[in-house]
Image (cartoon, rainbow, N blue to C red):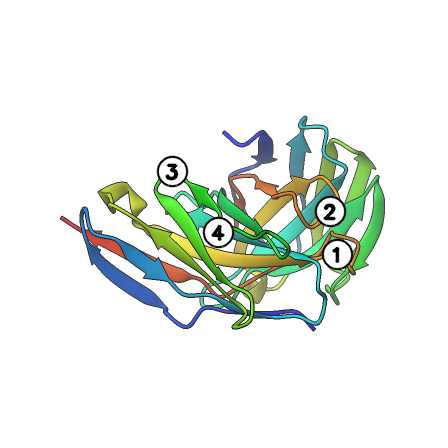
Amino acid sequence: ETGVTQTPRHLVMGMTNKKSLKCEQHLGHNAMYWYKQSAKKPLELMFVYSLEERVENNSVPSRFSPECPNSSHLFLHLHTLQPEDSALYLCASSLQGAGTEAFFGQGTRLTVV
Amino acid sequence: AQKITQTQPGMFVQEKEAVTLDCTYDTSDPSYGLFWYKQPSSGEMIFLIYQGSYDQQNATEGRYSLNFQKARKSANLVISASQLGDSAMYFCAMREINTGGFKTIFGAGTRLFVKA
């Protein structure tokens, strides 16, 4: 248990569906992240939020829409996804600074059919 | 630009032996942090060990140690006395100060197989 909780753990959705992934941390961290992990690809940083403000968007398609309503919660809203979006989506949080490790949630295994 | 390279897609080690997982990095920022994470089949990323770019000594955490060679830009993870539970994916990662300390990039990972 790292203190970062992601729900749901598994999600199967059709290409026309709208769903949301949720991430929650109560570690007092001020930065939260979404990563995508596909088979045979390095972990890809998607979005970074610091103090509820998005500070990085790594050329992620608009069908992925993040939301950070407060420093403890992070959402990833999904709509009209493609099969190639099937992956493990990992949420992480940390304190700002190079010397602090990020704590990860257990991930959401997303399958788009 | 940041870059992390892990050249070993898979490694095999006998139980109770030591194993070294390679990691090289590239950065123009003199201030950075290096991390190793373990990812078991459950998917969760587990932090193992941290090395700061200005740290004089190699980091150690229990059976994990980081062989930090700054001039070579390498940060190899050494696992001593391997256990069956060490079988997992291992990722090397780096975060720079210049990017505000937010962006952690990861290598492609090394899958470790521990044999009984």
Task: Check disc 4 and give the amino acid type.
Answer: Asn
The residue that mark 1 highlights is B97
Q: CA distance from mark 3 to mark 4?
A: 13 Å
The residue that mark 2 highlights is A97
Disc nearer the start of the sequence (3/1): 3
Q: Chain of mark 2?
A: A
Which element is circle 4 on?
loop
The residue that mark 3 highlights is B62
Q: Chain of mark 1?
A: B
In the foreground, B10 or B41 = B10
Q: Position of residue A36 (x, y in %)?
A: 59, 57
Residue B44 vs B95, above or below: the answer is: above
Task: Check disc 2 and give the amino acid type.
Answer: Gly
The residue that mark 4 highlights is B58
Q: CA distance from mark 3 to mark 2?
A: 24 Å
Q: CA distance from mark 4 to mark 2?
A: 20 Å
Q: Are marks 3 and 2 in contact (CB under 8 Å)?
A: no
